[in-house]
Image (cartoon, helix red, strand yellow):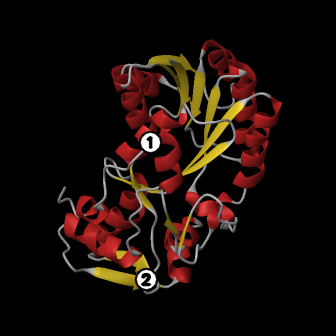
Amino acid sequence: MKIFLTGGSGYIGKTTISALVRHGDTVEALARNDRAAGTVASLGATPVRGGLGDLGVLNAAAARAEAVVHLAQAGTGDEDLAAATAMQDGVGTGTYVHTGGTWVHGDTDGVVDETAPWNPPSLVAWREPVEDAVLRRARQGGRPVLVRPGLLYGGENRLIDMFYAVPGKEAGAVPYIGDGANRWALVHVDDIAELYVAALKAAPGSVYVGVGGVNPTARECALAVARSVGLDGKVASLTLEQARERMGPVADAFALDQQFTPARAEAELGWTPAHTDPLAVLAGEE
């Protein structure tokens, strides 16, 4: 299958390009500069020069493709919706896979699935009207599919490195928020890449949470990260106010108590997470 993909030089994108190529797909990937173009080319994709604001480029690339995978992070809801609209217009009746995130559901009060109500922190509140508009295309002959990844780990480990490992090394103790009893819905980057591949064959209007099904506490994750950076056992609690000062709005997302099951994707797509010991990976033991 011929795929057009955005965000190909990013954390999820590089792994997803590799997975698509491994499965025999041909990939064109948006590249906003020479460095991004070199990255996607090295993974086996053909670079398409442009950014998310280049709607004509997005539309034309999507029109050449049989399916689109939109991974790039937009700056605003308006930017994301404009890009999604251009690509959905271009791909027509081909599959369009859009990226959301589990944070939009807020605290889950136990283990839930894709039907959980929305209660997003301010950081991701803009996603709801975008996702609604994307999914409405299913009633107009389109093939939209929505993937909501959990908190990613493995590989470059962007958010956890940035807000936990790096400041932890500097301070001598890895932080966690409050008592750290809140749970994180984690997913390995290699597993989420395979879910994007599987989602290309999903029914129009489908929504999947991309999670590993293992939901450790934030404190357990902090202890694992501390072990990985040579600070075994050295963790420190921050109040939510302190976390907001240090981390910004993402602190409210990290403080969420979330547990999700991947059962729908397993049943409908045959996707099964291969990585089921996130603490070992976070600790650098796997």
Camera-near label (1 vs 2) is 1
Q: Amino acid at mark 2?
A: Ala
Query: Residue 284, percent across and down?
Result: 20, 59
Dot 2 crowding, Cα within 10 Å, few <14, some 14–19, many 20+:
some
Is 153 above or below relative to 36? below
**Badge number at residue 181:** 2
At x 37%, y 66%, the residue is 164
At x 42%, y 81%, the residue is 180
**Does residue 68 appear to the left or right of 10 in the view shown?**
right
Quarter of the image where one finds residue 161 = bottom left
Quarter of the image where one finds residue 19 = top left
Q: Can residue 31 be spotted in the picture? A: no
In this view, the residue farthest toward the front is 267
Q: Nearer the viewer, residue 252 or 64?
A: 64
**Disc 1 on helix, strand or loop?**
loop
**Does residue 119 appear to the left or right of 258 in the view shown?**
right
Residue at mark 1: 270
**Disc 2 on helix, strand or loop?**
loop
